[in-house]
Amino acid sequence: MAESIVLLSGGIESTTLLHQERQGRSPVGLFVDYGQRGAARERRAAQTQCDRLGVALRELDMASVGEAFREGLDRRLHVPLPHRNLVVLSLGLSFADNHGAARLALALNREDADSYAGASNDFLQRFEDLARTLSPIEVVTPLVALSKAEVIVLGTELGVDFADTYSCLLGYPQHCGSCPQCLKRRAAFEAAEQPDPTAYRRD
């Protein structure tokens, strides 16, 4: 039985968190497909990391939900799912409860918490309070005090191969190099003074 459920996107933070949870716990990765353009590549990255650690990966398919949100917005390269963390955390909590896990782990970093309401400390505290009224499952964000660069340093110490992670919002086979997530990725490797193993379409 899983001791913790790790919400896994295949990106830098969630991969690092999976490796961290693997130290002394028996985690299960949970990938949520909500119709994001990079879903197939995110899933592949998540599966690669789970296979490497001998961890099971489970998937919740909400692709039709994302497609409904993109309806009529075909010209926009990135159409986010509003309040994504609320949706994904709620699904994760239900999944953890169903599987008897004691812990639900979400990979947010310090910059995430400062950037949007659905990752703020206030939101997380309120969700944790709500979760406690439903079940004894602990909702945790172990990386929230770290910058993205600090997460990369931690992941390197844990043996993460960041070449097998995926961050691009646009879903290209190679990271585009210019979307907000790619720009943050590039800047974080530079700030961490670590070699960036990512192949970008645009240098």
Image (cartoon, grey):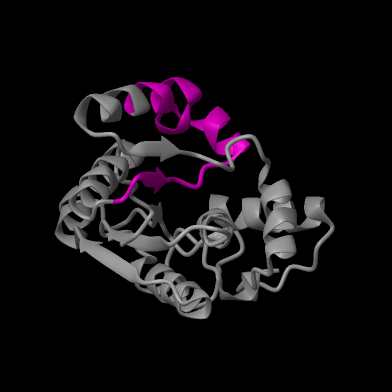
In the image, what residue occupies the spot 31% across and 50% down?
101
Number of marks in the image? 0
- Does the magenta-highlighted stretch encompass residue 74? no
Q: Nearer the viewer, residue 70 or 75?
A: 70
Taking 69 as reference, is 104 left or right?
A: right
Q: Nearer the viewer, residue 44 or 127?
A: 127
Q: Which x, y percent locates residue 83?
A: 31, 36
Q: Which x, y percent locates residue 89?
A: 31, 42
Taking 57 as reference, is 97 left or right?
A: left
- Does the magenta-highlighted stretch encompass residue 111? yes
Image quadrant in which you'd find residue 103: top left
Task: Please identify the quadrant where the N terminus is shown.
Answer: bottom left
The region drawn magenta spans: 101-127
Q: Which x, y percent locates residue 117?
A: 43, 26
Outermost right residue: 193
Q: Which x, y percent locates residue 48?
A: 47, 78
Can you say whether 70 is above or below 156 in the image?
above
Task: Please identify the quadrant where the C terminus is shown.
Answer: bottom right
Can you say whether 175 is above or below 93 in the image?
below
In the image, what residue occupies the spot 74% across and 68% down?
196
In the image, what residue occupies the spot 80% across and 63% down?
194
Can you say whether 18 is above or below 57 in the image?
above
Taking 82 as reference, is 111 left or right?
A: right
Image quadrant in which you'd find residue 129: top left
